[in-house]
Amino acid sequence: MRPSLLDPLFAPVSVLPGIGPKIAKLLDGLTGSTPGREASVLDLLFHLPHGVIDRRRRPGIAHSENGEIATLDVVVERHLPSPRQGKAPYRIIARDPTGEIALVFFHAHRDWLEKTLPVGGRRIISGKVEWFNERPQMVHPDYVLTPEEAETMPDVEPVYPMTAGLASRTLLKAIAAGLGRLPVMPDWLDPEFAARKGWPDFDEALARMHRPEKAGDLGPESPFRARLAYDEYLANQLALALVRATMRKLDGAPRIANGALKAKILAALPFTLTEGQTQAVAEIEADLASPHRMLRLVQGDVGAGKTIVALLAMAAVIESGAQAAMMAPTEILARQHFASMAPLCEAAGIRISLLTGRDSAKTRRETQAGLLDGSIDLVVGTHALFQGSVEFQNLGIAVVDEQHRFGVHQRLALSSKGKGVDVLVMTATPIPRTLVLTYFGDMDVSRLIGKPAGRKPITTVSVSLERMGEMVARIKAAVAEGQKVYWVCPLVEESEKIDLAAVEDRHRHLSQELKLPVALVHGRMSAEEKDVAMTAFKEGHARVLVATTVIEVGVDVPDATIMVIEHAERFGLAQLHQLRGRVGRGDRPSSCVLLYKGPLGETSAARLAVMRETNDGFLIAEEDLRLRGEGEILGTRQSGTPGFRLAGEEARPDLMETARDDARLILETDPELKGPRGQALRTLLYLFSRDEAIRLLRAG
């Protein structure tokens, strides 16, 4: 049960004065509350300002600078009403000892203005000063007050992200009312730690963010911001630690293998494992041999050889007498994993099968029967694998590829398909360390550093789209030498129709210019059409493949040596790096051409520069975090992983690591959160909507 202390915060915003259904709907959109649920008072209080207006600056009219916010003490001289029919604004001339200023009002009500700004009256006005034809003016001042009312104007006023149709006065009033409902929270921080940091209480910190006394109060280094960021990180890390503890409690089984299947697979490989692969396999085997369940993330750069690591992990589990399942995010990728593993499984005597949404009812029934009676050792498929109807005789390990598309809930769902299922998660997007802590704090991590022997580095160049003719001529020459080329066009949901037309146009254009078969793949095609195109490219019937980003992950054509990315400025760094990783998989030197449309913005130019300078995915991921913020790197906008509201976009690795250590220590000393600090921490979990973790405590 949520502590009753929090009830005033979880009430809908419509309980606040002045918030009717229309304003409540605007606040739902502004605060990003869960669709279908009205924003709560807490959602509103977690909507923090991004800047401040300092109204203490009183330079006098003549000394006010263009574009600055100034507070002026003036006397009203005269009114210059707009002509009856004209659209000209209503102007009022006011002066102080340094000069005169025009106050400008559009769609003005003359009676109201004559009453608010009477001729000869002294007024305190505050707003943005603009110089026009060397004369100062202020359009719609923010404040017009009598000297007696001047006290009511805040010296420092917070500025919030806004939405159309919502007046800032309405928002400020609602937030002030919301702060009035803020209870004194029990303190969930270790008192010595909080004192050492010089942090205020949670309620004081939140109130100060909405009532800043100076711009620095909102900065990442301020004690108020740091305290709130830490609380949010701690709630997240504690929830992940509770998931981990629950997964561990559902005890695993020690899976002991003698290494016979591993030896057969390694003998069938045309290369030896890299040092990184060998180490990752050793870590996984140690996890499997322990009585606790494995929960491990393997992250490697593009082409670091994660699939073989996963196969060796599954072989160890199969050898111990259980079954293995591998889940991929797309059908193309599931089929590809199956194709690359099938010959190795055959060599080792492992019975492998494929299960996708496209299978006929008969094939699906046969596969399901094989999983249930144990005649299939290893199944590869999309997330259809973990839907209700699929049952296993004895599932021992689940391997999840491209983890960031699946959240913690799916991780728990996997476990329900067997007893003590070990979970191995793989991602080809190197993730900055900070984000590994944030999203995978419940996992152990293996990093695959280094690439398989024989891989050649990829040369990356950026070329303006104006040189398209030259580019096509170079592609023609490369194809004549027997090379294969990917040509990728962007696809952005908002303009999907336009982009689809652009991809088809490019396909037509290249077919005409090269006078050769050119394959085409995009998201609107059926799976069969995509397969036909991919096969034509793989087998060399078409030496050029024009595609949208459907080929971003996992497509493997070892003899493709050139990657052209059109409108590269429209792609994120991680995506550019993924696409580049489709070439350089064979023994021939490869190149990646970033075609861009100038002039480039600062961020786009920085992205292309990073791509030219390095092939290191981990370095690229750190840069991507710096340039874009965490949400976009992991696709969190779509995948339901936690976006931080109080900590902000700027990740604080120092605070996050401390929160992770703190969460582990808490669960070692008070695993049920029953002590005084434990009870306060339950309040923290409810406050940040991590109450699923509390349900795990009760279930466990």
Image: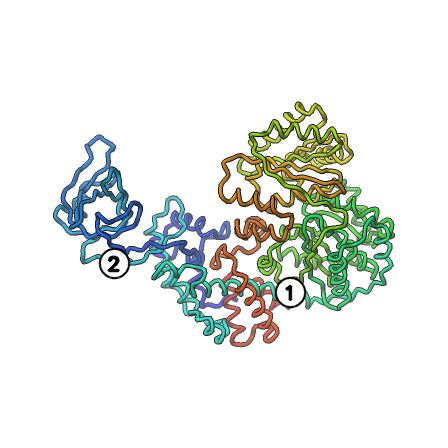
Q: Position of residue 636 (x, y in %)?
A: 57, 51
Badge 1, how many Cα within 10 Å: few under 14, some, many 20+?
A: some
The image's colour scheme reads rainbow
Identify whether 500 is placed above or below 450.
Answer: above
Nearer the observer, 529 or 192 = 192
First in sequence: mark 2 or mark 1? 2
Q: Residue furthest left?
A: 120
Q: Position of residue 154 (x, y in %)?
A: 29, 58
Determine which residue is flagged by label 2.
152
Q: Position of residue 50 (x, y in %)?
A: 41, 54
Determine which residue is flagged by label 1.
244
Identify whether 532 is placed above or below 634.
Answer: above
Tell me if residue 235 can be seen: no
In the image, taking residue 248 as reference, residue 645 lies left or right, namely left
Q: Quadrant of the C terminus?
A: bottom right
Q: Position of residue 407 (x, y in %)?
A: 62, 55
Callout 2: helix, strand or loop?
A: helix
Q: Amino acid at mark 2?
A: Thr
Nearer the observer, 481 or 74 = 481
In the image, taking residue 580 as reference, residue 51 lies left or right, namely left
Measuring 19% from the left and 32% from the top, which residue is drawn there?
83
Badge 2, how many Cα within 10 Å: few under 14, some, many 20+?
A: few
Q: Amino acid at mark 1?
A: Arg
